[in-house]
């Protein structure tokens, strides 16, 4: 059984069918790519499986063997699903360290009462959490900014923090929504190597939405292509690249210069 | 600005140094410092100043509590004074009708108010912003109206002869004695709110304030934590209400719980810099002094306070807390950045 399975997954916004009858299997241990033109429903897919939007009736989502179709986001997160957002949604006024510590929330093994009396046990646990989180910050290269408000980071650092915050939940499945958007080529490579290091170290399964085709082609084991909320292709990166339906979907849309440039690079 | 704040900076450094010995040390030192305050104030020969101090301390409890739900958790509530009223009335009635000593009546009132906090907080599960404000305003104001029309709750005459707290033969029956009680309560309240802020729960509250959706996908049960924030702030309001009720002369009236008090309380938190604990404390001190000295202008108080609030939000959104953070507290990352820019120069 796949780690994440959707069956007949659908979502309409008013008359707009953002996702329609979508069956996707993300196998444990793989890197799965999700691509498609702008507005094809990739972010909506993330919002559905992570519980942010309720899917339409008739849909089914199974994660780690549990039916999560109707589960709230925090319950799904507890089962081991983490995601980033295309627009990051960092906790801007909180420090970098606090951001990742929020990610660790469900693993904090003490109650509010324990904190109030500030027992030695609580202090020990707190010290351990801080240490673990600092280690994570080390991996994503933000350790020296631990006490800086997230709002003051640079664009690239913010993307790294979003990644670190998601990783702090100790997920089985990490879903990245355009993690490299807006990064310079050097930073794209840096981000990718960090993602790969995290995957190896924590045995992650990855689902990556990415516009930069190079990223998808270089890293993914399997790719699903969406257009207008429907699956129009699936397979290994090379299979997908040569699929006429996919090529047409990509060529049929208006691309801005940046996208054309990136498509050419790939 | 820097020169003006230099003495405070010394104070902050002093307390920060104490905190390095142990987290509790600065609190104990501050407590000892504050103990002789009534003696100093009574040298003026005017009891009013001690009375004012006590009222301020009660409002500090309210303001620190409101900061938890509004400042940490970002939930707009205008029903807080209703909770304060519930705490005051519950404790009074338990003491008068059932003869409960203060030490039993107050905790019971705190628990009752905490439960009422769930009700005030329920709309937050569905509503946000202005809608939530309206819902909580309605709930809070209906508490006052209930009190005003129900004879058993005091109605128009209020509740009188609420007995003062007592330990053995020591009765907290004048302002000076009562000061020790409310000062201790306020200190504990502030200390606990720092503990909450530092805890995983505090981080969950702030995450909800910053971004509800991001908080939820990182494993935070948003509705439950919103309610928890309301309940915690209600516990503060309950304690403040009970302390107010039993303070000499032991009299409460529904006029103590109007929208004027609510606006005053909101102004304390806004002036302090929403979500800043010390800011909220200083805000409470400043605003309450203004409030108590302009009582004869009660008809324009809400309007004036409301206007000040709007001006603060526009021109000084970080409030006093912002000033504290910018000028008084040395932060590691600020130092870090200075070092960096030095290196580059
Ligand atoms: N909350 C929403 N309300 C209404 N329409 C939405 C909402 N979210 C997404 N959509 C619409 O659904 C379609 C798919 O959007 P999205 O999933 O963001 O695409 P992608 O991430 O592939 O670019 C778009 O037409 C978008 O306008
Ligand atoms: Mg998108």
Image (cartoon, coloured by chain):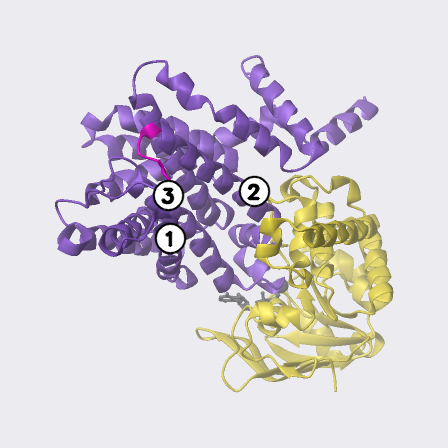
Chain colours: A yellow, B purple
Instruction: State the residue lying farthest toward the front.
Output: B169
Please indicate, yes or no, whether residue B221 appears anywhere in the rendered image.
Answer: yes
Q: Secondary structure at mark 2?
A: helix
Q: Residue at x 81, y 62 (%)?
A: A214
Residue with the mark numbered 3: B240
The residue segment tinted magenta is B168-175
> Where, quadrant-wise, is the C terminus of chain B in this rendering?
top right
Q: Which label sits in the foreground, 3 or 1?
A: 1
Q: Quadrant of residue B183?
A: top left
Residue B291 left/right relative to A78: left
Question: Which residue carries the number 1 mark?
Answer: B104
Q: Nearer the viewer, mark 2 or mark 1?
A: 1
Query: Could one spot residue B314 in this view of the protein?
Result: no
> Given this view, does label 3 or label 2 mark the residue nearer the observer?
3
Q: Which numbered circle lies on residue A121?
A: none
The residue carrying mark 2 is B194
Q: Secondary structure at mark 1?
A: helix
Is A199 above or below relative to A49?
above
**Upstream in sequence: badge 3 or badge 2:** 2
Secondary structure mostly seen in magenta is loop
Residue B331 point in image, percent of width and height: 68, 31
Residue positioned 49% across, 32% down in the render: B279
Q: Which quadrant of the structure image shows residue A165?
A: bottom right
Q: Nearer the viewer, residue A223 or A126?
A: A126
Label 3 – label 2 distance at C-alpha: 18 Å
Q: Residue at x 33, y 29 (%)?
A: B175
Mark closest to the chain's N terminus, 3 or 1: 1
């Amino acid at each position: 059984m796949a780690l994440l399975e959707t069956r007949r997954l659908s979502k309409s916004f008013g008359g707009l069918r953002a996702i329609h009858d979508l069956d996707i299997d993300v196998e444990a241990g793989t890197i799965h790519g999700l691509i498609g033109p702008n507005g094809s429903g990739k972010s909506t897919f993330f919002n559905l499986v992570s519980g942010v939007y309720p899917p339409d009736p008739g849909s089914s989502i199974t994660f780690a063997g549990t039916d999560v179709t109707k589960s709230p986001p925090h319950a799904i997160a507890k089962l081991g699903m983490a995601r980033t957002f295309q627009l990051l949604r960092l906790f801007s006024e909180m420090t970098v360290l606090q951001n990742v510590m929020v990610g660790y929330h469900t693993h904090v093994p003490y109650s509010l009462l324990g904190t109030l009396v500030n027992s030695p046990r609580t202090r020990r646990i707190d010290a351990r959490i801080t240490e673990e989180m600092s280690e994570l910050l080390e991996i994503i290269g933000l350790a020296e900014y631990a006490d800086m408000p997230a709002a003051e980071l640079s664009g690239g650092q913010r993307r790294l923090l979003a990644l670190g915050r998601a990783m702090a939940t100790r997920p089985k499945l990490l879903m990245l929504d355009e993690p490299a958007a807006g990064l310079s080529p050097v930073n794209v490579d840096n981000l990718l190597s960090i993602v790969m290091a995290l995957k190896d170290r924590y045995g992650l399964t990855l689902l990556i939405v990415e516009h930069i085709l190079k990223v998808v082609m270089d890293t993914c084991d399997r790719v699903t292509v969406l257009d207008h909320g429907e699956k129009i292709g699936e397979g290994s990166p090379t299979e997908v690249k040569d699929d006429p339906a996919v090529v047409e979907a990509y060529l049929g849309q208006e691309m801005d210069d940046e996208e054309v440039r990136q498509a050419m690079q790939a | 600005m820097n020169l003006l704040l230099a003495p405070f900076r010394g104070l902050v450094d002093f307390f920060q140094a104490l905190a390095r010995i142990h987290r509790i040390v600065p609190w104990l030192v501050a407590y000892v410092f504050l103990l002789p305050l009534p003696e100093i104030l009574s040298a003026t020969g005017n009891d009013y100043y001690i009375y004012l101090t006590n009222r301020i301390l009660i409002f500090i409890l309210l303001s620190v509590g409101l900061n938890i739900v509004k400042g940490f958790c970002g939930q707009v509530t205008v029903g807080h004074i209703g909770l304060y009223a519930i705490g005051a009335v519950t404790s009074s009635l338990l003491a008068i009708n059932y003869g409960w000593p203060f030490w039993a009546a107050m905790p019971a009132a705190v628990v009752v108010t905490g439960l009422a906090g769930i009700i005030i907080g329920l709309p937050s599960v569905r509503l946000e912003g202005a809608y939530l404000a309206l819902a909580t305003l309605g709930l809070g104001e209906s508490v006052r109206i209930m009190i005003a029309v129900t004879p058993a709750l005091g109605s128009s005459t209020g509740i009188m002869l609420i007995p003062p707290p007592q330990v053995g033969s020591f009765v907290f029956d004048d302002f000076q004695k009562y000061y020790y009680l409310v000062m201790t309560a306020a200190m504990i309240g502030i200390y606990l709110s720092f503990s909450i802020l530092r805890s995983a729960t505090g981080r969950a509250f702030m995450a909800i304030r910053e971004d509800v959706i991001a908080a939820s996908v990182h494993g935070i049960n948003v509705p439950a934590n919103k309610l928890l924030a309301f309940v915690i702030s209600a516990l503060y309001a309950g304690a403040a209400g009970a302390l107010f009720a039993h303070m000499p002369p032991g009299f409460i009236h529904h006029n103590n719980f109007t929208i004027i008090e609510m606006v005053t309380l909101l102004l304390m938190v806004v002036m302090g810099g929403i979500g800043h604990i010390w800011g909220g404390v200083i805000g409470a001190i400043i605003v309450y002094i203004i409030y108590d000295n302009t009582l004869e202008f009660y008809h324009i108080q809400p309007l004036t306070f409301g206007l000040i609030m709007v001006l603060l939000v526009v021109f000084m959104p970080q409030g006093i807390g912002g000033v504290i953070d910018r000028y008084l507290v040395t932060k590691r990352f600020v130092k870090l950045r200075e070092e960096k820019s030095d290196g580059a120069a």
